[in-house]
Amino acid sequence: MSHLADKQIKWTLNHIAKSDDVQVKNMSKEEMIKAGNFHKSFPQYNVTPLTKLSNLADYLGLKSVYVKDESYRFGLNAFKVLGGSYAIARCIADELGKDVSEVPYSVLTSDKLREEFGQATFFTATDGNHGRGVAWAANKLGQKCVVRMPKGTTQTRLNNIAKENAEVTIENLNYDDCVRKAAKEAEETTRGIMVQDTAWEGYEKIPTWIMQGYGTLAMEADRQLEEDGCRPTHIFIQAGVGSLAGAVIGYFANRFKENPPVMVVTEANAADCLYRSAVKADGSRVDVDGDMLTIMAGLACGEANTVSWDILRNHASAFVSCPDWVSANGTRIYGCPLRGDKQVISGESGSVTMGLLHAIMTKPEYKDLKDALKLDENSQVLLVSSEGDTDPDRYHEITWEGLCGTEKEPFEDLK
């Protein structure tokens, strides 16, 4: 991990062969409104903050920088619950022959619905946040949940899921193999339902619902930006399998059809399947396998979501592969803001876009990328901090102890 080549930000503009672009319609404003109305039925629902970092924008030479802070989402410290809860509701509504508007939170948690629907077991694989969201939603709705986690997962993340009455284990498998294990178990279980935030051939309906659930945060951010008189020129969004990226980029591609923002997909270089697919540029998907060791646990996914890939190949402007120091710097920048700016507590998977934006605007070696993205004093940038300090020990290692300090220093092997 100490080779200089492993420490450089890699990027490519989008030259991918276009498809028929059939998936972007699923991320329309109408679909997001439907998901948003469902989320509003939860007593825990509040619009998460959109934080404007004016002094940082001045420092970086940008017009404005906005951050959608998902650490406040439903008290779960991450955005993932938006997708899991909506997908479970859609599954229940589908089985009962109802529209999702007929099964708000009050109905889903009622004795009458439990008598009508009974009990299912929702299976999923996760690095942490998605599984916690699915487990939380299943627990609230009186359903069973089984969660499989990949090797390298921390005990803290497992404990957070176990608190939601889920059966949860850490397997000696990487993330993508955990997905396959959970899917097989769901198939073999009576009333077992796989609720996964990635899609593959033959499994796309539920992942599409999950992505539509993520759209709630995009729609909220859009309204908040509009209230502040901002029309974003640039959106940086992180990706593991690409579900969040597909939802956000799909939403804004629909929102600004004639003149969309420059939209940049950002990955961990240990799991940069989207970047590698973009470099190949023929429309096929390139998988990454192995352990995929990175501090960005939520982005350690080596196989792209087929639904989101169709959106990204048609609407993303660029794909960027980032080493761990980029994320670590982002966490520190958020946590130690310039005087007058508000602090944002952002975990490793939430902060990589901030670290990337800072590197592009301050490091001469990335001037070509800055120019290619047309970032300047007129740019209005939207970022999403997708999680807070979901692993407090790792957060303190980064912010207090300098884990993954800079690209000029050797990395320590991840334990």
Image (cartoon, rainbow, N blue to C red):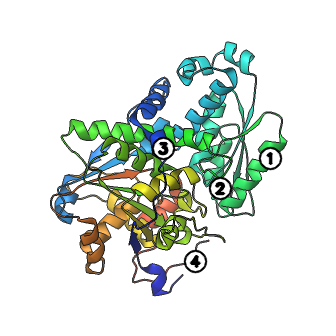
Label 2 crowd (10 A; few <14 / some 14-19 / many >=20): few
Q: Quadrant of residue 262?
A: bottom left
* Quadrant showing the C terminus: bottom right
Quickly name the residue at label 3. Answer: 79
> What residue does disc 4 label?
413
Which marked residue is nearer to the observer: mark 2 or mark 3?
3
* Between discs 3 and 1, the one toward the N terminus: 3
Horizontally, is 123 left or right of 249 in the view?
Answer: right
Q: Which residue is mark 1?
A: 185
Q: Earlier in the sequence, mark 1 or mark 2?
A: 2
Asked if marks 1 and 4 touch (Cβ < 8 Å), the reply is no
Dot 1 or dot 4, earlier in sequence: 1
Instruction: Left or right? Give the position of 221 relative to 38.
Output: left
What's under tag 3, amino acid-wise?
A: Phe
Farthest top residue in view:
112
Q: How many marks?
A: 4
Q: Residue at 66% of width from left, 60% of height from top?
A: 175
**10 Å crowding of disc 3: few (<14), some (14-19), many (20+):** many
Query: Do labels 4 and 3 touch, CB within 8 Å?
Result: no
Say what secondary structure mark 2 lies in: helix
State whether residue 409 is above or below residue 347. below
Residue ID at (43%, 72%): 325
| Distance Cα–Cα, label 1 vs label 4 | 33 Å
Instruction: Mark 4 or mark 3: name the one nearer the start of the chain.
Output: 3
Q: Which mark is residue 155?
A: 2
Q: Separation of disc 3 and disc 1 at Cα?
A: 26 Å
Helix, strand or loop for disc 4: loop
Q: Does residue 347 show up?
A: no
Amino acid carrying mark 2 in the image: Gln
Q: Amino acid at mark 4?
A: Asp
